[in-house]
Amino acid sequence: MQDAPFLIAGAGIGGLTTALALGRAGYPCLVIEQRTQIEDVGAGLQLSPNASRILIDLGLEPILTRFAATPERLQIQEGASGETLSSMTLGATMMQRFGAPYWSIHRADLQTTLLDAVRGLGNVRLIFGRKVSTIVKNDDAGVVVTCSSATQSEDVACRALIGADGLWSNVADLIGTKTSPEFLGYQAWRGLVPIKHWPAHLPTTESRLWLGPKAHIVHYPIRRGGAINIVAVTSDTDNRPGWAHPGEREKILTRFREWAPDVKAALAAVPEWSVWSLFDRRERTQWGDKSVTLLGDAAHPVLPFLAQGAALAIEDAATLAQEIAKSPDHPAEAFRRYEMQRRPRATKIQDAARANGQAYHMRWPLSVARNLVLRRSDLSKRYDWIYSFKNNEN
């Protein structure tokens, strides 16, 4: 099946970055997406240098700089008192230190940029409203899958199958034991504030992280400084899967009524809220089988406590494309090399994100020790191992 395309299930950030990397390297791709269109939903993203350098290498810098903001600093503060616990310079410092910027961007802006770039390639085809429902054949020579929509299905022969279909991955279920993600007891509230409505006394060029008992808040600029993205994560037993449940304004304001005045001012500026529940999945024992592999959240979901979920998917795409280029006629071999490279780093970042989630939400007296550690820590050195990543460096 050497003339058949690589089939990529999922047109999210990981799937589209993979299609762009493979398409620009000359490999035909077919991308199928279960949704009927890309919607302007989701939260902001922080693209640290390990991710931004890959997107720049793919030629996207001129477009992304139209949408991305470049925060000057990350500041961590105690939620109730407002005390600064630690800070890290971003902006020019990130570029000087790591050779790539630290960007913040709306997820929809990044996804649209990737989608437009992929559509500009003559060897990549996109089909919406379809999913991989069955794997008919899978061996070292290629894969045959059944792609289904609401009204029809057809068998498609492909050189290999890449499952980039997210936390609830159907491709992963087809090649391994079917398990459901675990609800962790967190609710994430997201809002977008036009810069003209942001409180005048609050920073517009910084990323701020506020820590408190059983909750934390992060806010940072997006859309080239034209808006502020704000996310509040609370410990909550209410389980609401999905991205677009409307949030009750009074409920979130009441939840943070004991926090610092700056926090309450930021929350009050949000015109409307959306809420989603956070799910996790422990490490998959199987990332691939023969000519099938997984990528991004389908392989290794990352909780949003380290701002590395999208970055890991982008890293996956670059590494996978690199390994395919070494043996394009033997994708199964390329997939196993990719999995061996990516698994240790993904696991380490997953564990670090889970640990951050516990630390962010600590209550007294454990929070006292956490705050002491933060006051004494050098955040830039703490995250060197993440931000300095380049292909073939784990």
Image (tube, helix red, strand yellow):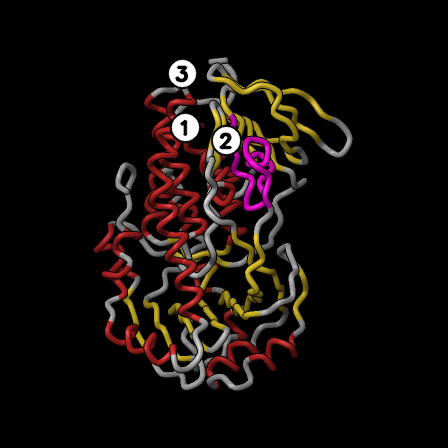
Magenta stretch encompasses residue 82: no
- Nearest to the observer: residue 191 or residue 300: 300
The three-letter amino acid code for the residue at tag 2 is Ile
Residue 133, relative to residue 107: is it above or below? above
Q: How far apart in space, not on screen, are marks 2 and 1 (Cα)?
A: 9 Å
Q: How far apart in space, not on screen, are marks 2 and 3 (Cα)?
A: 15 Å
Specify the quadrant that holds the C terminus: top left
Mark number displayed over residue 123: none
Percent across and percent down for residue 198 are 51, 75
Task: Name which residue lies at 42% across and 82% down.
Answer: 364
Q: Are the residues at dot 1 and dot 3 in contact (C-beta closer than 8 Å)? A: no
Q: Which residues are magenta?
A: 161-179
Percent across and percent down for residue 103 are 38, 56
Q: Are the residues at dot 2 and dot 1 in contact (C-beta closer than 8 Å)? A: no
**Count of numbered badges drawn on the protein:** 3
- Label 2 element class: strand
Task: Name which residue lies at 62% across and 20% down.
Answer: 136
- Nearest to the observer: residue 214 or residue 365: 365
- Label 1 element class: helix
Q: Which residue is mark 1?
A: 335
The three-letter amino acid code for the residue at tag 3 is Asp
Q: Which residue is mark 2?
A: 162
Label 2 or label 1, whichever comes before in sequence order: 2
In this picture, residue 98 sits left or right of residue 332: left
Viewer can see residue 102 = yes
Mark number displayed over residue 329: 3
Residue 331, relative to residue 309: is it above or below? above
Percent across and percent down for residue 183 are 58, 57
